[in-house]
Image (spheres, rainbow, N blue to C red):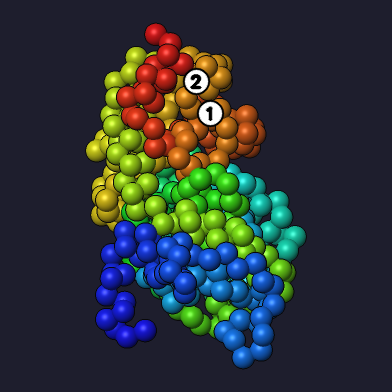
Amino acid sequence: MSADDHKPFQHPATIAAAALGASRPEGGGVVPILNPATTYEKGNAHMYYRTSGPGLADAEAVLNTLEGGAGALLFSSGMAAATHLLLALGPGAHILAPEGMYWFMRDWLKKTAPAMGLEVSFYANTDLDAIRTGIRPGQTKAVWVETPANPDWAVTDIAAAAEIAHDAGAKLFVDSTCATPILSRPLLLGADVVMHSATKYLNGHSDVLAGALITRDADDFWGQVHAMRTGLGSTLGAFEAWLLLRGLRTLDVRMQRHSENALWLAERLSDHPRVSHVMYPGLPTDPGHAVAAKQMCGGFGGMMSIRVKGGPDAAAQTAKRTKLFFDATSLGGVESLIEHRGPIEGPDSPTQQDLLRLSVGLENAQDLLDDLDQALGQ
Ligand SMILES: *Cc1c(COP(=O)(O)O)cnc(C)c1O
């Protein structure tokens, strides 16, 4: 491709919608082709699918360009992406992770990672001083940040965390699942690798399980991560990669609508007589708002949580009474979801027992508010 060929692909909306040119296959079709081959004739760019494949490479190229990276890898799930990244640091590595994060990742870090040779300790989420003091010079190989973070959408300053990590010779890894490259680009703020559960917004249709890593440098460590994906065989399947690319094409417009709907709902729920607290970084009163306004652009995403008056029982009943919101786990799809997190995360979790997590979908915002209104009761 010449420099001119890249010109139409400068803007995120165009990169995504045109799938970076993959939507112009030979023969004139306007959608990317599904190529399920697992092996390729010698002399071509790919040899065997566990290492790399054409449709997989197309989806990886779109993500890499959106994040401004030097390489992208797709995995069979978000957990596969995250765990491969950490395990590639090697046995004995110390990882500093936030107390408030995607609960299953925290669970894995606490219960499984030590048995696999990693040492893990935790810092109070968003607290830069706690990151500074939690780092063990010489032993800490990576600081993990999730922002905005499950399930209270706390916002961590990526640029500041990167500086602290780098000063100590550690890498900064950012779980950017809920921001997506449309709203935030961690690599440009100093992160070394950005991770996504592509199951969520990147695919956006609740029909693919996938994970992504995008790196700032295609260095030896990145080679290790790729070798680990090939070695453990956790490459994303060709059909899933094709579906993910289909979903990615509408990412820009979906993130705008998710963000608009969520902000509108957050403002109205803030005044609701049955709601004691709304957690959403788009609200000027939210503790994470200033940092979010600095490092996100175009919106604050579609995730929010509310605490309801009346305690855990009222929260449980509200989730059961919604008609438009599905009472279901996961997030980032076109359909709105509501979930009472306490019973999911268990007694060890710091999550408040009256907290309901909302994944605000693409429905009409007034319809969503009406549904929450009737479910919350008067
Ligand atoms: C869902 C999720 C994950 C795990 O991804 P899977 O695709 O379910 O394996 C990790 N981080 C965040 C923030 C998530 O929402």
The residue under the point 32% across, 62% down is 14
Tell me where residue 43 appears, x and y as whole percent: 62, 91
* Image quadrant occupied by the C terminus: top left
The amino acid beneath tag 1 is Phe
- What is the number of the mark on residue 326? 1
**Furthest residue to the front?**
27
Quarter residue 260 falls in: top left
253 lies left or right of 242? left
Answer yes or no: do the residues labelled 1 and 2 have beta carbons within 8 Å?
Answer: yes
User: Among all residues in the image, which is located at the extreme right?
Assistant: 115
Residue at 48% over, 56% down:
246
Nearest the viewer among 205 and 148 is 205
Q: Amino acid at mark 2?
A: Thr
Q: Quadrant of residue 306?
A: top left
Residue hosting label 2: 322
How would you rate the neighbour count of disc 2 (Cα within 10 Å): few for under 14, some for 14-19, many for 20 or more? many
